[in-house]
Amino acid sequence: MRRIKKRMTQEDTAQVLKKAEYGTLASMGADGYPYSIPFNFAYIKDCIYFHSAHNGHKIENIKNNAKVSFSAVNYVQLIPENFDTEYDSAVVFGSAAEVTDDGEKQQALLGLIQKYSKEYLATGMTHINKNMNSVAVYKIKIEHMTGKRGR
């Protein structure tokens, strides 16, 4: 990081990942093109979890090269009169893989429901049990992450 004074602690960086509404996954395709896509996620036990279809562009990229980058922002405040922006952001580097253990998969889906639909937990559990086999869950095992606070 070029501006060290903006570096956040690991604990504050983890808070960005816990609170951010969505994040953006960057992966590399077999064709040499990078691909970046935003989606909902859950930060659980130092890993990023997301659900997906069993195939598609991001899944093909992960199968081609498991190394990914993921970023999230949980605070943004535009300061137009200063031509500036305040923010808290996190950047993660790690490896992505499909979750094949049913228990871990269920915990990840539950984490997503607790984050985005906690008022509907009972209905969410029914939805998880009904759709466990039709949805894929992926995990990004974090190798290192950095956070930046722009204030």
Image: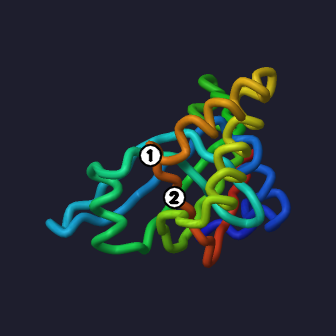
Instruction: Estimate how packed mark 1 is, as few (under 14), some (14 to 19) or many (20 or more) residues with alpha carbons within 10 Å.
Output: some
Closer-to-camera residue (133/47): 133
In the displayed structure, would residue 145 be above or below residue 57?
A: below
Q: Which mark is residue 52?
A: 1
Q: CA distance from mark 2 to mark 1?
A: 7 Å
Q: Earlier in the sequence, mark 2 or mark 1?
A: 1
As shown in the figure, which amino acid type bears the numbered disc 1?
Ser
Counting from the top left corner in percent of width and height, residue 75 is at 71, 37
In the displayed structure, would residue 73 be above or below residue 70?
A: above
Q: Is residue 48 left or right of residue 118?
A: left
SS at badge 1: strand
Q: Which mark is residue 138?
A: 2
SS at badge 2: strand
- Outermost residue, left direction? 31
Counting from the top left corner in percent of width and height, residue 151 is at 75, 45
Asked which quadrant contains residue 148, the reply is: bottom right
Residue at point 67%, 51% (across, down): 106
Counting from the top left corner in percent of width and height, residue 35 is at 31, 54
Instruction: Estimate how packed mark 2 is, as few (under 14), some (14 to 19) or many (20 or more) residues with alpha carbons within 10 Å.
Output: many
